[in-house]
Image (cartoon, rainbow, N blue to C red):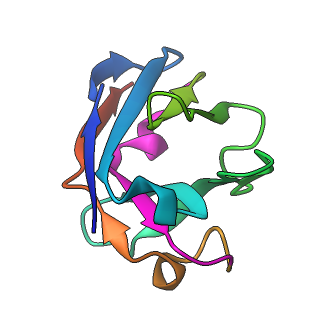
């Protein structure tokens, strides 16, 4: 089992920045990939960014490329999402997820463990 706890969400004006964190605990060695997802009211959950634990290759949704950066501190079992140039369209609940196998990094179905989420609200 892997437990994930997100933090760092909040309210920010358009153009601002936020940094999300996700602390992993439990059987963390089972992780192969970590990802960030988001879900806005009335919309499906969508993949935002993914990163392989080994090697650190990163992947981004087109909507966030050039604005968001996913990173990890493996010594601390912590995942980050730096979000810059935020817009109201980025408003959503953001979730951290962990996968125990290599798959589609931006597909929710590839992940087995999920955090409770942290709310990000961007005002215009």
Image coordinates for residue 7, horizontal then vertical, percent:
26, 31
Q: Foreground residue, 50 or 27?
A: 27
Toward which corner of the image does residue 98 lie, by quadrant?
A: bottom left
Image coordinates for residue 111, horizontal then vertical, percent:
46, 75
Quadrant (top left/top right/bottom left/bottom right) for the C terminus = top left
What residue is drawn where x is 53% and y is 81%?
A: 110
Q: Foreground residue, 53 or 106?
A: 53
Number of disc labels: 0
Image coordinates for residue 10, horizontal then vertical, percent:
24, 25
| As drawn, 111 above or below 89 | below
Which portion, as a residue range, is magenta? 86-102
What residue is drawn where x is 49% and y is 57%?
A: 29
What residue is drawn where x is 75% and y is 43%?
A: 65
Is-magenta flag for residue 91? Answer: yes
Q: Residue reaching furthest bottom?
A: 109
Is-magenta flag for residue 105? Answer: no
User: Is residue 88 rendered to the left or right of residue 71?
Assistant: left
What residue is drawn where x is 39% and y is 76%?
A: 44
Q: Foreground residue, 32 or 65?
A: 32
| As drawn, 99 above or below 63 | below
Image coordinates for residue 28, horizontal then vertical, percent:
41, 54
Quadrant (top left/top right/bottom left/bottom right) for the N terminus = bottom left
User: Is residue 105 rendered to the left or right of residue 119?
Assistant: right
Q: Foreground residue, 37 or 33?
A: 33
């Amino acid at each position: 089992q892997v437990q994930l706890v997100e933090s760092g969400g909040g309210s920010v004006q358009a153009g601002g920045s936020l940094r999300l964190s996700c602390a992993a605990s439990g059987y963390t060695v089972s992780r192969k990939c970590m990802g960030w997802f988001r879900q806005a009211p009335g919309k499906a959950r969508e993949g935002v960014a993914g990163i392989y634990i080994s090697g650190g290759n990163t992947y981004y949704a087109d909507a966030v490329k050039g604005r968001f950066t996913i990173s990890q501190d493996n010594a601390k079992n912590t995942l980050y999402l730096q979000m810059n140039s935020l817009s109201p369209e980025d408003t959503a609940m953001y979730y951290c997820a962990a996968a125990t196998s290599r798959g589609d990094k931006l597909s929710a179905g590839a992940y087995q463990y999920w955090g409770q989420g942290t709310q990000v609200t961007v005002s215009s």
